[in-house]
Image (cartoon, helix red, strand yellow):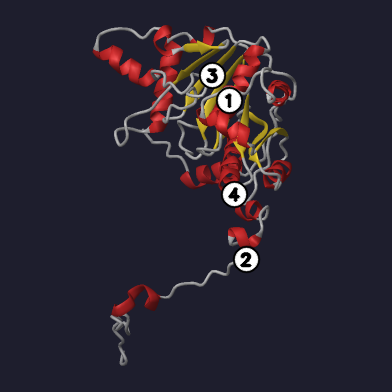
Amino acid sequence: MTLDIPNLKDFDARLRDEAHEEPSLEIPMDPPTKKTQIIAIYGKGGIGKSFTLANLSHMMAENGKRVLLIGCDPKSDTTSLLFGGKACPTIIETSTRKKLAGEEVKIGDVCFKRGGVFAMELGGPEVGRGCGGRGIIHGFELLEKLGFHDWDFDYVLLDFLGDVVCGGFGLPIARDMAQKVIVVASNDLQSLYVANNVCSAVEYFRKLGGNVGVAGMVINKDDGTGEAAAFAAAVNIPVLASIPADDDLRRKSANYQIVGTHATQWGGLFTELAENVADAPPLRPKPLTQDGLLGLFDAETTGADFVLEPATDTDMRGKFAGEIKSLEVVYDNV
């Protein structure tokens, strides 16, 4: 009997050739065929995703849509604005507690509602005791057991932390769980760096046959300097809304007041955002290089004009610096 041993060099070459091929499939531009639009929202921590989503979901519900908001951030703060600052029990902590008591989790244990919006938090492990990405995966497994795929909603909004690039937080993109992605950013380098990473992740999984696209960007705390809008234009995605850096918005957000309602002066802004989110097709972005991203800002601000000075071996050894004697043996007479 002979063993058929594969040629590993040929196999490696095929994989490298395949990785460099441009995918031939294009993202469908037609409206999603599934009734429920599942939309994943990404952004830098603290950029205002929870503020944006709480008010967006409230406005969608006020306009007659059935909306489910799911917080997928270990901080579990997505629903705090919606519920007046009160933290709701997370799916992971509730599941653990029920399991220890020999009980099953019911939907009323983890899902709560206000103003027509249904909302829940996946949660995460205790600090230092687990992986946040694994917690996200575990949370969605529990949602499937609760009947997630049979629920009847017009929109399911998923709030994801964009700073973390591990597989758990990339779940909607990697597994085609969502039809489209929205990024929340501002006119600062760090938030746009995260937005660019999300665009890179979408592009990566598109090359692997994925179908998720980026529907656009929400500019939060817009001070009018224009870097976020320039980024959106550069990566070929639309700006869905620009939420101004306004003291009234800041105060109401700090006091856990909903502004995404027709009862406030901001009703028109969030109505327009809701319409744009609903209609925006999933696009294939063109992520920027690091230099391209830095080029959106003034060089003095980002350090783009700084010249790097290489370190030397003498620098590294400090007080131990000195001539290194060679251990090479030289034979003069052979």
Residue 108, compared with residue 237, is above or below; it is: above
Which amino acid, by three-letter code, is at mark 3?
Leu
Location of residue 25 in the rendering, given as x and y in whole percent from the top left corner: 69, 30
**Mark 2 and mark 1: Cα distance apart in space:** 38 Å
Which amino acid, by three-letter code, is at mark 2?
Asp
Q: Residues within 10 Å of mark 4 (few under 14, many from 20)?
A: some
Q: Which of 25 and 226 lies nearest the eye of the viewer? A: 226
Q: Residue at x 52, y 25 (%)?
A: 256
Q: Label 3 near label 2: C-beta < 8 Å?
A: no
Question: Which numbered disc flags the more N-terminal residue, 3 or 1?
Answer: 1
Q: Label 1 near label 3: C-beta < 8 Å?
A: yes
| Residue 207 visible to the viewer | no
Residue 322, compared with residue 180, is above or below; it is: below
Q: Which residue is mark 2?
A: 305
Q: Which residue is mark 1?
A: 53
When asked about the image quadrant of residue 222, the answer is top right
Q: Which residue is mark 4?
A: 189
When asked about the image quadrant of residue 300, the answer is bottom right
Left or right relative to 184: residue 46: left
Q: Residues within 10 Å of mark 2 (few under 14, many from 20)?
A: few
Question: Which numbered disc flags the more N-terminal residue, 2 or 4?
Answer: 4
